[in-house]
Amino acid sequence: MLKKILIANRGEIAERIIKTCSRLGIKTVAVYSEADKEAPFVESADEAYLLGGPRVQESYLNSAKILEIAKETKAEGIHPGYGFLSENAEFAKACEAEGVVFIGPSPKVISLMGKKVESRIAMEAAGLPLVPGISRPLKDADEAAELAGQFGYPVMLKASAGGGGIGMQACSTEAELRKAFEGNQKRAVMFFGNGDMFLEKLIEKPRHIEIQVLADKHGNTVYLWERECSIQRRHQKVLEEAPSPFLDRETREAMGKAAVEAAKSIGYSNAGTIEFLVDEEKNFYFLEMNTRLQVEHPITEEITGLDLVEEQIRIASGESLGFQQKDIVLKGHAIEVRIYAEDPKTMYPSPGKITNLKLPQGTGIRHELGVTSTSHVTPFYDPMIAKLVIKGRTRGEAAARLEEALAQYHVEGIKTNIPLLSEIVAHEAFKSGDTTTDFIQKNIVKTNTISS
Amino acid sequence: MAEIKSNMAGSVWKILVEPGEQVTEGQDIIILESMKMEIPIASEQDGTIAEIKVNEGDFVNDGDVLATIE
């Protein structure tokens, strides 16, 4: 097994990876930006090196510097975490060239699944159903209208370069679509310098359900059930749970098998996630594949008893999976909420200095933390400061524990989304498992000021 | 003369208008960036941009004046 690993990330996920490495007796190297000098992960690692300024180009995306430090410290592997360089095929290739193990799939697979169009084609060939749509940029509004007629309304218009919901719009009539096309294309050019637009059929009342897969380098691939991630704000996940309250055993297994087949067909290795949209009739459609560890991986760990970071390291070290599909348990229910430094009403970022932090403790409560009671939350990175993971024997027990834990979770000095999370968990629709992707818009926020 | 203010701490990612430019209510003037989010700041009225008080890359705080409009 790898003896020394550099963690090319920050915050809670760097802490998370260090924890598993320490348990396995693996030495850790942290890298950090000037803005993160005082961050807990810098302290937790066996060694830590400054990358550069706070901007990500100077620090966490500075692949040359990161590789240089890996070589100097004789780190045998690099764990990229999520975000930053985790889905950067060029970086994975550079690691390979320098003889450092990139803990993730091959550069070829990362590159393939990172492309919207190519990944759709590959997944369709592997037998995964796709949402009806167009796999090349639209010519103009006329073509959009013609295709929408074929797919049937409502449709979703998407900017190719868009992200975080910008440049995305649902349209239920041709007039709406034509107006949206002009407006969003202009916005996309202005924001991203690329006006390419795509169109697909809009799945109504969809759920976002993803399958975790693990594949070793010897042809063994398994799935670790699903995660339901439908509750989102601005197309970013807020609360995730496993198993999904919506799936029956038959659908769960069908999705799992389809995901395994898809992973095998592209020669996938390491941990990966296939995201699906699931409609009201439990039809599932391929959305995208994330070729890395997910933020919400702890809920899978809670129901299966596996440590996904450990599995990633073992796979990257060349080991075979130590279990088969039939050995993977699904026990209990787990829910994760993401604690964001943001205004719970407007959902605008709220960086600043934390003056007090009190965490709930008790049975079934797990914390993944990127901050301390004196941390300065800077505006340079993702607003997620912590994750609260709750386990129960049943969904009801987990939800009740979560509600109680949130009531005892205190962060002072900055605003957080905890009030929003409490509102979600207390809502009847959540309790009954009625969790579709419009949950927050429909049940919580009536005046979201951020366009999406 | 009205002021267009920042509603959060972050950096100025893009400035979309120039002094002297006519703008309408709801038109995006500046895009701020904070915590990996790009947040457009729109004009609250029709008018002419009098002055842009910030440069791209500047750090701004909640309540800072970004531009004035008349």
Image (spheres, rainbow, N blue to C red):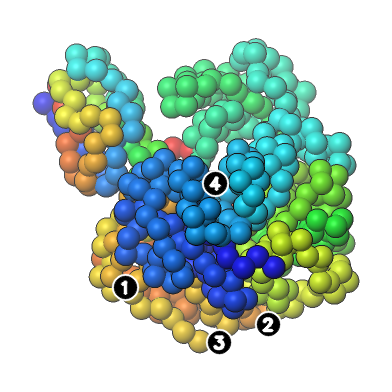
| Left-right relation of A386 to A249 | left
Q: Share a chain, discs 3 and 4? A: yes
Cα distance, mark 2 to mark 4? 37 Å
Q: Secondary structure at mark 4?
A: loop
For this orientation, the residue located farthest to the left is: B1
Q: Chain letter of disc 2?
A: A
Q: CA distance from mark 1 to mark 3?
A: 23 Å
- What's the chain of the residue with tag 3? A
Badge 2 amino acid:
Arg
Element carrying mark 2:
loop
- The residue under label 3 is A363
Judge whether residue A448 can be spotted in this image: no
Q: Which residue is mark 2?
A: A393
Q: A333 above or below A385?
A: below
- The disc, 3 or 4, on the residue closer to the chain's N-terminal end is 4
**Label 3 neighbour load within 10 Å: few <14, some 14-19, many 20+:** few
Circles 3 and 2, Cβ within 8 Å, touching? The answer is: no
Q: Quadrant of the N terminus of chain A?
A: bottom right
Q: Between tags 3 and 4, which lies in front?
A: 4
> Do callouts 1 and 2 mark residues in contact (Cβ within 8 Å)?
no
Disc 3 to disc 4, C-alpha distance = 35 Å
Of A72 and A31, nearer the camera is A72
